[in-house]
Image (cartoon, rainbow, N blue to C red):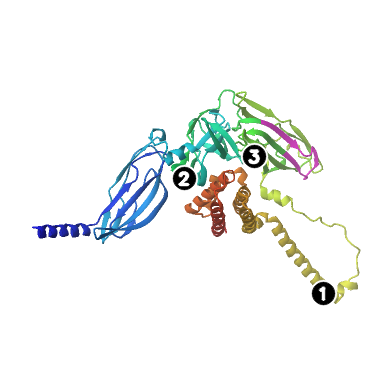
Amino acid sequence: MRAWLAAIGMLVSVTTWGQVTFKAYANETVVGETERFRVTFEANDRWSEFEPPNFGPFRVVQGPSQSQSTNIVNGNMSTTFSYSYILQPTQVGTFTINAARARIKGQLEKTNPLQIKVVPQSEKAADPNDPYAIAQRSNILRVFVSKRDVYVGEPITVTYKLYYASQIRNYSGQAPNLNGFFKEEIELKNQREERENYKGKLYNVATLKKYVLIPQKTGELEVDPFVLDLETAVPTQQRDFFGRPVYQNVSYTAKSPTVTIDVSALPAEGRPSNFSGAVGTYSFDVALSDTAVSADESATLTVNVSGLGNLKLFELPQPEVPKSIELYDPKYAERITASSKGLRGSRKNEYLMIPRFNGDYKIPEMSFTYFDTDKKDYVQLKSPDFTLHVTGGSDDPGAASSSGVVRRGREEVDYLNEEILYIKTRLGKTVKKGSGFRTSPLRWTGYGFGLLAFFGVLVWRRRQEEQNADVAGQQRRRARKVATGRLAAAKKQMDAGEHRAFYEEIARALEGYLRDKLQMDLAGLGLDRVLEELGQHGASEELNARVKELWDATSFARYAPSSGAGADEKHYKATLELITELEDVLK
């Protein structure tokens, strides 16, 4: 009887040993919306052609991580092979992670699906002494909005701050999308470390990002949260030999709350027909360089708007001049900075005008309208009219009364700026035919050398002009060399332990390189616009994601406490590698 039982046991053991098991499990099935959890796919034999599921509303923070383990129980050896992912929820609800697939022993196998419930973090019951709960209490992301009820086009300021009471070892940020808003980042300069009491607890405070937001449509617009992945050291209940608390590294995702902005339409009543969308407080100035010129000489009409508001988001007024005056496309210039109250600065158009006939020409007044949010009314500003007195040239009595405009393009303006040699009209004295130098053989030799010298100087001068004119080309060619020099300076700061100075040099290297290569004023553009331009040059999504990750990391690191030499070295190498790869894309 015992022999039969032993035989049956061996048979069951062999049968079980030969079966393939392929399963999925999670270390948590109910998680808070800011918590991370681990999903593992495990088999009892080697696999190939592994196909993970679509994780849907869960963001992959880390993975896949491969592992292999061997166990011996009662003399029987078993080996398991696994893939693990660290996931982060992106929304609240109950979700299913579908089965993973793999080929094991030649057969296509699949795991069981997993159901994960995501609850608001405030509803997640947790042990107050749990390291994750401590990390959650010790690191808080807050958002500050200057105003919540605004008009379309009215600037507001949004500031994201991290309140932290634990040591931060590593971090990476995910900037908000801020859809429905025009976004301009405010440069953070000379930040001091701040400490603030929040809800009865003392925190260090670091400002992560500060934006000017200008709503582009009416209704309720959401200011998206800022998401920050942190690795922080928190104390546990354990003590070391000397009685000091033992710290544990915890990976935690801090997320600021979503804020709703109520955006109203600008009033239709009292809106002038020339209103082009300007909102804020502005001054308007029109100037004429000369009031008296000769025919075919130029004068410049300058149209300037300066002030504070949505300065980049409206059209400047255009002048109307008599048809007998040629009006060329304007030369545009702007000086705009993002401030806590909006976009501040000035914009101007300079129009080159050339009258062709004599007479007195009237340039009508111009008007500019903006909406004043303090007065809640439209304000219209007007310039004086001008009279241009033109002397010389022929008469054209009908020209001055005509209201048409003759416009010329920018290429014609550039042509007018070139030097034109004056034609020599006075003749020299007559020399008798067949006498003197004109019949000498040296004459032709001299002409030959003269022509060669002339063309040589002409070619040399043209090359010099092209090189001097191609400032943008020189900047593009020298971009990598300049960035390499800045990285060398950054390494010196890193070796000296100057954390903030190191990241400032890293940021200058990356931003300067992109500015020179793309020929873009980054101070007037958001990162999204830079990434769009990189995409148009052929940069892959993966490369753009690395640019964004490094940009955000260096922006935050300048004002956060040091995470150690390891993080600095990592960002230094990442910048060097990124610029090298961008060089292949931005040829």
User: Which residue lies at the image location 30% right of the left edge and 49% below the top edge?
Assistant: 24
Q: Earlier in the sequence, mark 3 or mark 1?
A: 3
Say which of marks 3 and 1 sits in front.
Answer: 3
Real-space CA distance between mark 3 and mark 1, rounded to the nearest whole angstrom: 63 Å
User: Which residue lies at the image location 75% right of the left edge and 62% below the top edge?
Assistant: 461
Q: Amino acid at mark 3?
A: Thr
Q: In the image shown, does 134 or 309 lie closer to the viewer?
A: 134
Real-space CA distance between mark 1 and mark 2, rounded to the nearest whole angstrom: 95 Å
Q: In the image shown, does 363 or 360 lie closer to the viewer?
A: 363
Say which of marks 1 and 2 sits in front.
Answer: 2
Q: Which residues are magenta?
A: 282-301
Q: Quadrant of residue 74?
A: bottom left
The residue singled out by tag 1 in the image is: 445
Q: As drawn, is 38 to the left or to the right of 44?
A: right
Looking at this rendering, what residue extends furthest in the left direction? 1
Q: Amino acid at mark 1?
A: Thr
Q: Quadrant of residue 188?
A: top right
Q: As drawn, is 291 to the left or to the right of 500?
A: right
User: Residue 403: percent from the left, percent from the top?
Assistant: 68, 35
The residue singled out by tag 3 in the image is: 337
Looking at this rendering, what residue extends furthest in the bottom direction? 441
The residue singled out by tag 2 in the image is: 246
Q: Considering only vertical position in the picture, is 216 above or below 499? A: above
- What is the quadrant of the N terminus in the image? bottom left
